[in-house]
Amino acid sequence: MCYSAPMRSSRGDQPTLFGEATVPAVPVDAPLAERMRPRSLDEFIGQGHLVGEGRLLRDMIEGRRLHSLILWGPPGSGKTSLARVVAGSLEAHFIQFSAVLSGVKELRLAIADAQAERRRGRAVILFIDEIHRFNKAQQDALLPHVEAGTVTLIGATTENPSFEVIAPLLSRATVLVLQPLAPEDVRALVELALRDRPRGLGARALTIDAPALEHVIEQSHGDGRAALNILESAADLAVQRGVATLSLAVVEEAAQHRARRYDKAGEEHYNIVSAFIKSLRGSDPDAALYWMMRMLDAGEDPLFVARRMVIFAAEDVGLADPQALAVAVAAKDALHFVGLPEGRIPLAESAVYLATAPKSNASFQAMLAAAADVERHGPLPVPLHLRNAPTALMQELGYGRGYQYAHDHADQIVDHAHLPDALAGRRYYRPTGNGAEAAIGQRLERIRRRRTATSTDGND
């Protein structure tokens, strides 16, 4: 959720770029997360790729161009706040509608309301929260009113709209992707709520310890609403106990989650990552799962875990099991597709697969050896027979002369060299006898014997 800096209108309504808003003011006794909603794009924290200077949404508002939108993002990323700001800034009549609580009957009433406002000459924004919960028939019922311009649709969804919104409706809207709030955005939001007197907690004159603030950031997982809910609960506890500082203990109690000993930039982070990788390398799936869950439980970015497994699959499993890299990449893609908490399941599958797979770092070592020769010998010339010869001059100079097309030979084996002369006979890749790499090693040996025999025959 994206939130705002303190700002008031003389009438108590939400101020806009172009006058008074039509979205009613939030009651003073509403939850902190509701009170701290932004009232203009300038008050947003986060989503700079949408609301920053020169970005699509800001240009749309400043140009007073109203378009249907689908806001796709995780909980607490600001979808409802964004819809309210758009309506307020453009002075549009705002109808908020829940796809979970309402059906076609309620939709008809909302459309009737919109038609009445349109007759008065006012633009109408119909905001449908969790639009992915609308079935096809409900979306079909909405479509003609969007097509006719009776309403401008703003739909909010946590699910991929490509799968959850019918194509005709999707084609009439712009899909905007909202991201979880970055840690620095959550920090700014919490600090703002603490000092904001009219709408936040400023009147309580509370401060927050650095470890407590970090715990709020960690436990919110980029969800602004969650961060403010934790902060409000911690503030209530502090007031009840007569203390003016939100300590780590108070925040832990409010969040019902103790801080883990895991600093993403500190020693413990590297210790646990090291334990995870070494458990995979040591073929211990149980330990690998434990260390992986320690990282996720402490708030580690799950894509970091997925990236480490992709690297491990290529570096430590290698061609002993060529499928390992595909499994690791598929786990990364699945995580990105489904998100947390379900994304932990493909990560666990990948960890178990990698831990139990045969291991070989032969291709990794070959890469290092080749890189060392590049560094040691510099840009060695390409042998003439391997060079391309697209012009007559190049052909006259011997480019491509003597090149043997592998598919013209038995087993696609040729007897000329492919390395620079200075590196003749160099071997970088030395396959192990583990897993699928054993068969690779046998094939390479057959190729070398055939090449040696062909070369010997040619010298006789």
Image (tube, rainbow, N blue to C red):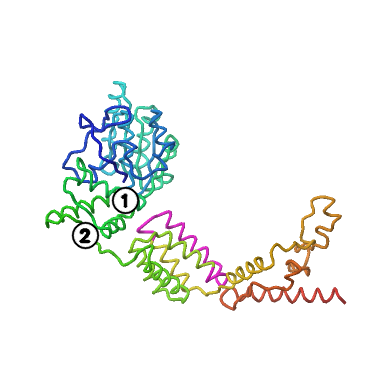
Magenta segment, which residues? 315-343
In the displayed structure image, the side of residue 308 where residue 190 appears, left or right: left
Residue drawn 27% across and 28% down?
Answer: 20
Say whether residue 129 is magenta: no
Q: Which residue is mark 1?
A: 186
Q: Position of residue 143 (x, y in %)?
A: 38, 33
Q: Position of residue 341 (x, y in %)?
A: 35, 58
**Dividing the image into 4 quarters, which one contains the C terminus?**
bottom right
**Helix, strand or loop for the magenta stretch, by majority:** helix
Image coordinates for residue 243, horizontal then vertical, percent? 14, 56
Q: Are marks 2 and 1 in contact (CB under 8 Å)?
A: no
Count numbered badges in the picture. Answer: 2
| Number of residues whose C-alpha sits closer than 10 Å to that of mark 1, classed few (under 14), some (14–19) or many (20 or more) | many
Sequence-earlier tag: 2 or 1: 1
Looking at the image, which is closer to me, 235 or 146?
235
Looking at the image, residue 345 sits to the left or right of residue 242; the answer is: right
- In the rendered view, tell whether residue 41 sits above or below residue 228: above
What residue type is disc 1 on?
Val
Look at the numbered disc 1 and give the secondary structure of its residue.
helix
The residue that appears at 83% across and 63% down in the rendered structure is 402
Question: Toward which corner of the image does residue 451 lie, by quadrant?
Answer: bottom right
**Mark carried by residue 247:** 2
Position of residue 106 measured from the top left corner of the image (x, y, whole percent): 26, 35
Alpha-carbon span between mark 2 and mark 1: 18 Å
